[in-house]
Amino acid sequence: MTAPDADIAVLGGGLAGGLIALALQARRPDLRVLLIERDDRLGGNHVWSFFATDLDAAGTALVAPLITARWQGYTIRFPRYTRELGSSYNSVTSERFDAALRASLPEGAILTGTEVTAATPTSVTLADGRVLAVGGVIDARGAGTLPHLTGGWQKFVGQMIHTARPHGLERPVVMDATVEQLDGYRFVYCLPFGPDRVFVEDTYYADSPDLDVPLLRERIAAYCAAAGWTVAAVGGEETGVLPVVAGGDFAAFRAAVDEGVAQAGIRAGLFQPLTSYSLPDAVRFALSVAASGNLSGTGLLAASRAWGEAHWRKGAFYRMLTAMLFGAAAPADRYRVLQRFYGLDAKLIERFYAGGTTMTDKLRILTGKPPVPISAAIRAITGGVAFAPLGPVATDGAPA
């Protein structure tokens, strides 16, 4: 009997696929894992960020080699207040992601510059005609579309800015919503990677996925000028259009996308419905794969389906909040919802991003003076507002 080309083939070297390969190497070094990526570099061109409280000890250990920068605390700015929170914040850049994976995985485990044209639970067909026989397949190539799901969009352009003089930021500004509110809820996100290097991202919670990159570049330049930063150079740029999910038919979604092969990442719906935040879910799923007792193609498919269904059920509260944000607030007033949320207890905010919102947290979020009209909120969460179907998705992850 001919030996397989690999025990597990992971399709897509973005965040979800790279973490699965890393987890398998750490927990199951006896397996031959093949990570296949169509581009020349793993991780694309992204910055992923997360709070230290998003991950348990195992998750923290898995991502530790990937972290480019750590900060103790971060800033939030809204028209009514500025707030400093103490949570530890971390960022991973694609450059570090690519280098760490190449250092961790054995020679021959990474195949870049290679397009996958077809896959079954036990085979992968490449664009050059080769057919690889494998023990199991996980498809983590990002989502071209999200059929049967509805909602809105989080879209952004981010640039790594090199300033002529020190910019003066000591900690991240995770949301600066004091900027003019355009095309939905708008905020600017700033990460100080060095005294004269800051990542600046212009982000929108919008009804349309249309992204005017030249316009957002102009707005980033204007934001830097208003902050007193002279731009010496732009070191890199990322763009993205991510789903923000208000509802949908998850069973129909899975039937349309999995095509009999295990799925991971955005294409599997594994992200926080309101924030599009994907790193914690990618870490958890990667560790669950590495701990699985059945890594055959059919075993991986069953496990990924069960994981996705459980994640969908767990996300019901966040989808309801998405419906309220997009359906009950006028686009220019959506910031009021986040302005109220970020005035709540810091631990509640941490649990929210980690996907661990408690029943007490939910009651606290929903009680008090509402930032939107009550009648509009009820209409939005009871189906009185029609949300757009989610079409093409441009990237597999981003800071939230």
Image: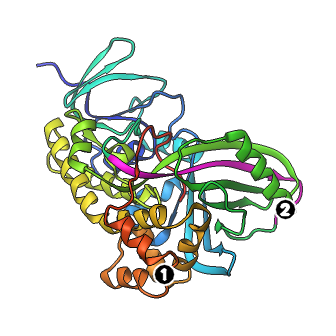
* Side of 282 where 331 appears, left or right: right
Q: Quadrant of residue 56?
A: bottom left
* Residue that mark 1 sits on: 370
Which residue is most to the bottom? 368
Taking the spot 59% from the left edge, 80% from the top edge, the residue there is 85
* Residue that mark 2 sits on: 226
The amino acid pointed to by label 1 is Pro
Taking the spot 14% from the left edge, 38% from the top edge, the residue there is 298
Query: Viewer-proximal residue, 74 or 28?
Result: 74
- Are there few (<14), some (14-19), or many (20+) residues within 10 Å of tag 1? few
Magenta part of the chain:
149-167
Instruction: Name the element at disc 1.
Output: loop
Cβ atoms under marks 1 and 2 closer than 8 Å: no
Magenta span includes 161: yes
On screen, 126 above or below 306? above
Taking the spot 65% from the left edge, 81% from the top edge, the residue there is 83
Percent of width and height locating residue 271: 39, 55
Percent of width and height locating residue 81: 68, 81
* Side of 263 where 121 appears, left or right: left
